Image (spheres, helix red, strand yellow):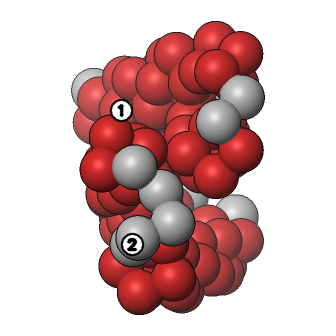
Amino acid sequence: MDRTFLLAGAVAGLIAVAFGAFGAHGLRGRLSPEMLAVFETGVRYHMYHALALLLTAALASRDALHGSRAIAAAGWLFIAGIVLFSGSLYALAVTGVTVLGAITPIGGVAFLAGWAALAIAAL
């Protein structure tokens, strides 16, 4: 599981940097300042949780937590959060389809649940 989350975190970080550069250079002037801020929020949370995936991978490799269901749940919840939270913000910003904003809180709950799962693993 640690290699899975290491790979997911590394790929998520790579994508977050690419999307951040795309937003700064490719979308500036094409999106309203409000929609650019929405896109940038997606990138920020994407990167935070790419780093959380790397932390999860490191913790999953520790003997005391190896095989922990809470650690595994945290990793999968962070991945779900990136897809749902950041993905919906990217899509909303680029397309302007406001109904996509309804998906964002589901991703936010996944992020919260992932952090809660890490706390449970620590107990």
SS at badge 2 = loop
Task: Tell me which corner region of the image, top left, top right, bottom left or bottom right, holds residue 34.
Answer: top left
Residue 31: x and y in percent read 47, 57
Q: Residue at x 51, y 66 (%)?
A: 30
Residue 28 is tagged as 2
| Near-viewer residue (44 or 117) | 44
In the rendered image, the vertical position of residue 118 relative to residue 10, given as above or below? above
For disc 1, the neighbor class at 10 Å (few under 14, some 14 to 19, many from 20) is many
Residue 53: x and y in percent read 48, 61
SS at badge 1 = helix
In the rendered image, the vertical position of residue 107 relative to residue 93, given as above or below? above
Cα distance in 3D space between marks 2 and 1: 33 Å
Which numbered disc, 2 or 1, marks the residue that appears first in the sequence?
A: 2
- Res. 120 visible in picture: no
Residue 37 is tagged as none
Mark 1 lies on residue: 115
